[in-house]
Amino acid sequence: MPHINLLPWREQAKQKKQKSYIVILVMVGISALGLMLLVDAYYSHLIANQQMRNQYLQNEILVLDAKIAEIKELKAKRKSLEQRMELIADLQHNRNLAAQVLAEITTTVPAGIFFTELEKKGNSVFITGKSESNNRVSNLMRNAEASYLFELPLLNTIVAAKANAQIDLLSDFKMSVQVKPFAERISAAEVNP
């Protein structure tokens, strides 16, 4: 006799397939969730690593900013010291300038001229004097221009002598010369010892 199965085998097969589908679906969900957690942990680790690097860079930037500020302060101090040193050097170079001016005037003044007034203001020397002739004033200006110490001689005024004067006929003149800067004086002195 043939064997007949009267049990609802189709429904059981369908339920079995449904159960296996749900199990597979749950397993896939758990796997996807686990994979998402792993990816999240990996990216969280990368972000934390990058934040640590950024923090390290920020700290180093702060250290470098402090060093830059210190360097700027040192440069300002250096500039101040250099200015002081230049001022001291200028004072040292100009210490004997009055004596040098007087010594150079004695060599540049030709015969027939004498000074009545000599005044120094800054780098300018103002000369007031008397001359026997205009040619002698011209010689004085040429000598001043050729001098290692003077430059830019400028004749301001020359007044001819009065014919009815009781003393010799002397003309009055006023002129000015500039004292050369120290570097130019040194180079001029080296060229013309």
Image (cartoon, rainbow, N blue to C red):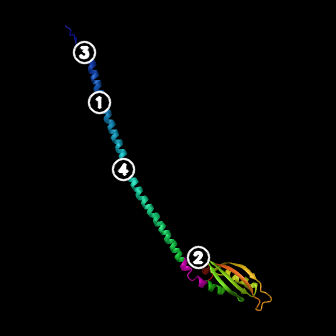
Q: Nearer the viewer, residue 160 or 6?
A: 160
Where is residue 124? Give x, y as percent.
Answer: 64, 78
Q: In which quarter of the image is residue 3?
A: top left
* Label 1 or label 2, whichever comes before in sequence order: 1
* Label 3 or label 2, whichever comes before in sequence order: 3
Q: For numbered disc 1, what is the local secondary structure?
A: helix
Q: For numbered disc 2, what is the local secondary structure?
A: helix
The label nearer to you, 3 versus 2, is 2
Using the image, tell me which numbered label, if any, was put on residue 183. 2
Q: Nearer the viewer, residue 173 or 150?
A: 173
- The number of numbered discs placed on residues in the rendered structure image is 4
Q: Quadrant of the C terminus?
A: bottom right
Whether 94 is among the magenta residues is yes
Whether 11 is among the magenta residues is no
* Label 4 or label 3, whichever comes before in sequence order: 3
Residue denoted by label 4: 52
State the CA–CA distance, disc 1 to disc 3: 26 Å
Left or right: residue 155 versus residue 78 is right
State the CA–CA distance, disc 1 to disc 2: 94 Å
Mark 1 in CB contact with mark 3 (< 8 angstroms): no
User: Amino acid under label 3?
Assistant: Trp
Q: Give the range drawn in magenta.
A: 90-100
Residue denoted by label 1: 27
Where is residue 169? Give x, y as percent.
Answer: 77, 89
State the CA–CA distance, disc 2 to disc 4: 59 Å
